[in-house]
C-alpha cells in the first residue's frame, strides 16, 4: 500500500480543486499526440489529426482529454487504494483498448508539463514530487492487470 | 527521430529566448531531478549536501545547462561535437543513460513553468527531440 503524508494529500487535493478539467485535459492529450505522435494510433476514429494545428482544434480530442482527466478523480477519492480502484480500468485498457501501458507514462509526463505551465512558480519542487508520485501510482495501477 | 531544419530553428529560437533564465532553469532542473527521482543522488555522494536547492546542486545544474547550450551550437553534428563529453561520461562518470531522460523531463517541466506561453506543443516536441539526440550523442562512447 502506498503511504501518503498529510502534506502530499494536501498538495494533490489542492491541484484538483483548482483544476479546469476541460482546459488541462484538452491541452494534455493534444500535447501527448503532438510530442509523441505514435500515440495517435489509438485515435483512428477521432477525425482529423493531420498536424499540430488540427489536433489542437479537434473537438473529439478535447472531449476525450476532459474524460481522461475526470478518470483521475477516482484516484483522488481513493488515494489509499488506487491499485484496486483502477483494476477494472486496467483490464479495459489491456483487453479492449489494447493500449501499450508505456503510453500512460507519456500522457502523465505531458500532464505534468501542462500543469507546470498553468501553475508557474507555484509548481514548487515539493509540489512536483507529490504530483509525480501520485501519477506514478496511477500509471502503475493502470498497467497492473495486463497479462 | 532526427530533427528537421524547422525543428532545429525552433530549438535555437527557444533557447535564445530562454537565455536570460538559463541558469535558473539548469539549477531548478537538477534540484527537481534529485527530489523527484531520489536514486539520482547516488551520483553525488561526494557532495556534503545533495538535497534539492543546495549550493552544489544549483551550481552543477548551471554547469549542465551550459553544456546543453553548447550543444545547441553544435546541433548539426552532435556526435562529433560532444565526443570528449561522451568520453567523460563513458569512462569517468559512468552515469546510467536512463538518467539523462529523467533530467530532460525535469528541464522540460522548468521550461514550461518559466515560459508557459512560448513552450507550445510544437516547441516541446522539438526540444524533446533535441534533448534525446543530445542523450544519444552523450552515450555514444559507452560501449
Image (cartoon, rainbow, N blue to C red):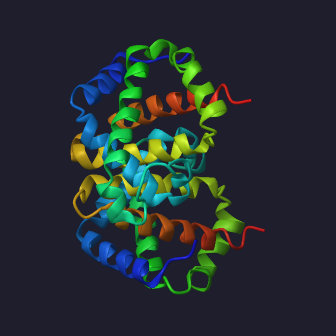
Query: Would residue B142 be found to the left or right of residue B128 on screen?
Result: right
Foreground residue, A46 or A64?
Answer: A46
- Residue at 36% across / 46% down in the picture? A60
Residue B82 percent across, percent down from the top left? 58, 79
Q: Is residue B136 depicted above or below A126 in this figure?
A: below
On the question of residue B119 being in view, the answer is: yes
Classify residue B110 as left or right of residue A132.
left
Residue A16 rendering spot, x and y as whole percentages: 28, 27
Position of the N terminus of chain B by quadrant: bottom right
Instruction: Place residue B6 in its image quadrant.
Output: bottom left
Q: Residue furthest right?
A: B143
Where residue A74 appears, as percent x and y from the top left, is: 41, 19
- Residue B58 in view of the camera: no
Tell me the quarter of the image containing the C terminus of chain B.
Answer: bottom right
Specify the quadrant of the image occupied by residue B114. Answer: bottom left
Please say if A2 is above or below A53.
above
Query: Looking at the picture, does residue A18 appear above or below residue B108?
Result: above
In the image, is A95 to the left or to the right of A130? right
- Identified at 64% across, 66% down, the residue is B89
Amino acid at each position: 500500500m502506498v503511504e501518503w503524508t498529510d502534506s502530499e494529500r494536501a498538495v494533490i487535493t489542492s491541484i484538483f480543486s483548482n483544476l479546469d478539467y476541460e482546459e488541462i485535459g484538452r491541452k494534455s492529450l493534444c500535447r501527448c499526440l503532438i510530442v509523441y505522435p505514435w500515440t495517435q494510433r489509438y485515435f483512428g476514429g477521432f477525425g482529423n489529426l493531420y498536424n499540430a494545428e488540427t489536433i489542437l482544434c479537434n473537438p473529439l480530442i478535447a472531449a476525450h482529454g476532459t474524460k481522461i482527466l475526470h478518470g483521475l478523480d477516482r484516484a483522488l477519492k481513493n488515494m489509499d487504494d488506487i491499485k484496486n480502484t483502477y483494476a477494472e480500468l486496467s483490464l479495459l485498457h489491456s483487453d479492449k483498448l489494447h493500449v501499450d501501458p508505456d503510453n500512460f507514462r507519456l500522457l502523465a509526463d505531458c500532464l505534468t508539463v501542462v500543469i507546470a505551465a498553468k501553475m508557474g512558480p507555484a509548481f514548487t519542487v515539493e509540489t512536483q514530487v507529490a504530483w509525480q508520485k501520485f501519477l506514478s501510482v496511477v500509471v502503475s495501477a493502470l498497467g497492473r492487470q495486463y497479462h | 527521430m532526427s530533427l528537421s531544419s524547422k525543428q532545429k530553428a525552433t530549438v535555437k529560437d527557444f533557447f535564445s529566448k530562454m537565455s536570460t533564465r538559463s541558469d535558473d532553469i539548469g539549477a531548478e532542473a537538477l534540484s527537481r531531478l534529485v527530489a523527484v527521482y531520489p536514486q539520482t543522488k547516488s551520483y553525488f555522494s561526494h557532495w556534503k549536501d545533495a538535497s534539492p536547492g543546495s549550493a552544489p546542486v544549483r551550481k552543477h545544474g548551471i554547469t549542465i545547462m551550459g553544456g546543453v547550450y553548447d550543444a545547441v551550437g553544435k546541433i548539426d553534428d552532435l556526435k562529433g561535437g560532444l565526443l570528449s563529453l561522451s568520453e567523460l561520461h563513458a569512462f569517468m562518470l559512468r552515469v546510467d543513460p536512463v538518467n539523462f531522460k529523467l533530467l530532460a523531463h525535469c528541464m522540460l517541466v522548468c521550461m514550461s513553468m518559466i515560459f508557459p506561453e512560448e513552450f507550445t506543443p510544437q516547441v516541446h516536441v522539438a526540444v524533446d527531440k533535441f534533448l534525446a539526440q543530445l542523450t544519444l550523442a552523450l552515450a555514444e562512447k559507452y560501449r
